[in-house]
Image (cartoon, helix red, strand yellow):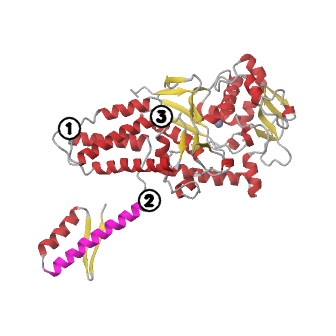
Amino acid sequence: MEQTLLIYNTLKRQKEAFKPLHAPHVGMYVCGPTVYGDAHLGHARPAITFDILYRYLTHLGYKVRYVRNITDVGHLEHDADEGEDKIAKKARLEQLEPMEVVQHYLNRYHKAMEALNVLPPSIEPHASGHIMEQIALVQEILDNGYAYESRGSVYFDVAKYNQDHHYGKLSGRNLDDVLNTTRELDGQDEKRNPADFALWKCAQPEHIMRWPSPWSDGFPGWHCECTAMGRKYLGNHFDIHGGGMDLVFPHHECEIAQSVASQGDDMVRYWMHNNMITINGQKMGKSYNNFINLSEFFAGSHPLLEQAYSPMTIRFFILQAHYRSTVDFGNEALQASEKGLARLMEAVGNLDRLQPATTSTIDVKQLRQKCYEAMNDDLNTPIVISHLFDACRIVNTVLDKKATLTAEDLDELKSLFHTFLFDILGLKEEKGDGDGRREEAFGKVVDMLLEQRMKAKAAKDWATSDLIRDQLTALGFEIKDTKDGFSWKLNV
Ligand SMILES: [Zn+2]
């Protein structure tokens, strides 16, 4: 933990040195998916961004409790207070129980995250499993005078709150901006002010997901879950709250307001947000017909894709941009990433083939410190990757016999790749079809050698026969002579 990590705090609009409230423990909350459809790039980016943070903090020696929630109730269409619940709508269309929809897409989300080598969080709480905590939160806000009941629903009184506190401090909006951009929607006559947001919604008779509360049978407003679950698992004050930039307003702004209105202050010390993804320069959205699921990327089964892209190619591609920059997906850029990652992996493999020399003609020692400096500068993964490419070039130079490295420096390079490429960036060798083909080809080469040995034996050329057997045995092959020829296996 001798490293000083700077992270960009959206709330302060600047980079700040990360100092946990209760070192070595770190509390970190990230908004997880609303599970009503397959995971897409919009899910991959925050998951990978905060996976890097989780891995790096752990690498630095912190004990991180990472909470990433599952939104399975209360997230209405258009992120507004009206319209159907996203999960209930899907359940109605597919004639399933809402929890069946949740389980189905959650299983698929977990599979996609595993493929992307995103580590599972410490706790993954469901909003529907924390209704009591959300009701308690709403009650506290009501008791403190920052909410009001209207026809069985409870709304947050934004104007009242803004008299005593600053509504908009995270997003930089003021109340007038919010009022000017709030659409008039049905049912807003229940609200005193169009900017007010729902803390509890009275369920319409046809609404399936409903729970009893002091106000009505209904369901919590979308923003309540993260405040209630963050507090439950990380305490009244914790270190980091993250999510996509699209959540800054209204979701995270409302979370801050709920926290201040209930406990008197904000729970979160550092607010972190990853930027968005575009596809061929366009915003991603169902209406643009460019909504590509992760499984379609992995299989190459979308008209916009020229080929399949493996999970590690997607991960590497995302990490080649800083998390606060936008990322534009296109075939050419993805293919370049695929090649780049293959070059790095090849260098790792080639390291084992390099013979150590008595002296080093290249300095490799500064690379590790440079990688730390980049990570410490607000998780600057593209710079870390550029240093790893430098390491890759060194390996190739030594391979071409244009430079030499000592055994100690070779070990340092191996350790550098292990620490940064594998442990911190979370990239890994993929065992795909290519590996199957490679193994098949290697197997045929061994067969060919053993057939030459049989010919040598038949010609009583014992020297050649023994040489082939001994050398294969030295490599770990177990060779048996059988009635009709030979059999072999590789002991690993
Ligand atoms: Zn959230």
Residue 383 visible in the displayed image: yes
Q: Residue furthest top?
A: 164
Q: Nearer the viewer, residue 181 or 171?
A: 181
In the picture, the disc for residue 432 is 2
* Residue identifier under label 1: 361
Q: Is residue 432 left or right of residue 154?
A: left
Q: Residue at x 75, y 45 (%)?
A: 85
Q: Nearer the viewer, residue 444 or 135?
A: 444
Q: Position of residue 488 (x, y in %)?
A: 29, 71
* Residue identifier under label 3: 63
Q: Residue at x 79, y 30 (%)?
A: 155
Judge whether 179 appears above or below 492 on screen: above
Q: Is residue 130 magenta?
A: no
Q: Earlier in the sequence, mark 3 or mark 2?
A: 3
Ligand 1 - quadrant of the structure image:
top right
Q: Position of residue 473 (x, y in %)?
A: 22, 65
- Residues marked 3 and 1 touching at CB (< 8 Å): no
Q: Secondary structure at mark 1?
A: loop
Three-letter code, disc 1 = Thr
Write the start and end of the magenta stretch as one range. 434-459
